[in-house]
Amino acid sequence: MIIPLYNTEKYIGACLESVLGQTHKELEVIVVDDGSTDGGAAIAEGFADERIRVDRGPNRGGAAARNRGLALARGEIVAFLDADDLWYPEKLSEQIGVLQGDRDVVAVGAVFHYLSGDGRRLLGRAGEDARDAAARERLQRGQLSPFPINSCLIAWADTVRAAGAYDESLPVVEDLDLMSRLALAGSVATVMRPLGAYRVHSDSLSARQHARMKMFMRFVEQRATARLEGRPALDLDSFVSLYRLTRAQRRRDGAARRFRDAGLSVMEGRYVRATALCAAALVARPSYTLRRIAMRLPVGRTTSAVRNPLATGGS
């Protein structure tokens, strides 16, 4: 399994403990230090477990760090985990059972809980199965992220390599791009119960650069759709140079940003601000906001989708 590490010393210890606590004990844990300037790599090196090895290198970004780990990995199954997230003990054993039990399945995810930056469990869960034909097509078109990919995904290592691994030219959403290519090779399954926890905090890239992430999500979608339909797509530089939002897109993106900021404000205990932001999102996009609120409630369906907000009918 591969853990890219960049300046997350306050989380890496708990992350590695959750890995070593797996009921599946045959592990090769590769921590790729991506030019960190804090003490995270030293913490990882301090674990007295021969299954862990730390590879130190210059800062090249998360995609390059994951690809470096993939190049070093010796196992036939590869798993990914971000250094600030956690796995529950049965995570790997349940996913491996699914992967090995169905020859059509090339990758497996799971439902994940949400955690605040200080480790509190938050309302809502992330994860949906994507094995039906409609969901698989949305995956192939870069329109669906069925679970927190970079901390949840396990797959056949050779399939990931054959798909081209992570695209290092993408500064963000490289996981969505990889998933669109894996879905061309076979089915993507999800263990439909919580097997880990995904940390959401104000330091995350998606919180700090919401508009930029939206742009790259749109790029991944147009490229994946062109690939599926057998036609040429714009390269990244051309796409960025021509990128313009319609008024409707600005309204949708603004509502999504306000709703996310409201959630972050709740985590930080800023409830008045959270209420105001949620109300603004509700005015801009009532159906979207009500659906997102319902997905956070601990009633009804047991899981909620992690969708590309740009997809038709998506969040």
Image (tube, grey):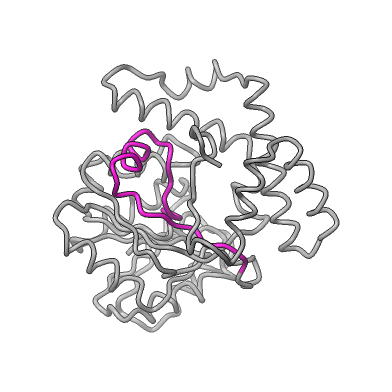
Name the residue rendered at 31%, 81% in the picture.
23
Residue 281: quarter of image: top right
Residue at the far bottom in the pictured view: 48
Q: Pick whichever, 279 or 162, lies toward us.
A: 279
Name the residue rendered at 61%, 55% in the picture.
294
Figure quadrant of the N terminus: bottom left
Left of 117 or right of it: where is 34? Answer: left
In the displayed structure, 117 sits above or below 220; it is below
* Residue 124 located within the stretch drawn in magenta: yes
Residue 49: quarter of image: bottom left
Left of 152 or right of it: where is 301? Answer: right
Bounds of the magenta segment: 122-150
Figure quadrant of the C terminus: top right
* Residue 92 located within the stretch drawn in magenta: no
Q: Is residue 236 visible?
A: yes
Please state the horizontal and vertical placement of residue 177, each as a whole percent of the image: 39, 39
Residue at the far right in the pictured view: 272
Please state the horizontal and vertical placement of residue 173, each as a whole percent of the image: 47, 42
Please state the horizontal and vertical placement of residue 287, each as a whole percent of the image: 64, 41
Name the residue rendered at 28%, 70% in the picture.
28
Residue at the far front in the pictured view: 300
Left of 144 or right of it: where is 284? Answer: right
Left of 78 or right of it: where is 238? Answer: right
The number of callouts visible is 0
Residue 75: quarter of image: bottom left
Please state the horizontal and vertical placement of residue 285, each as a whole percent of the image: 68, 37
Residue at the far left in the pictured view: 103
Q: Is residue 45 visible?
A: no
Q: Pick whichever, 238 or 308, lies toward us.
A: 308
In the displayed structure, 212 sits above or below 278; it is above
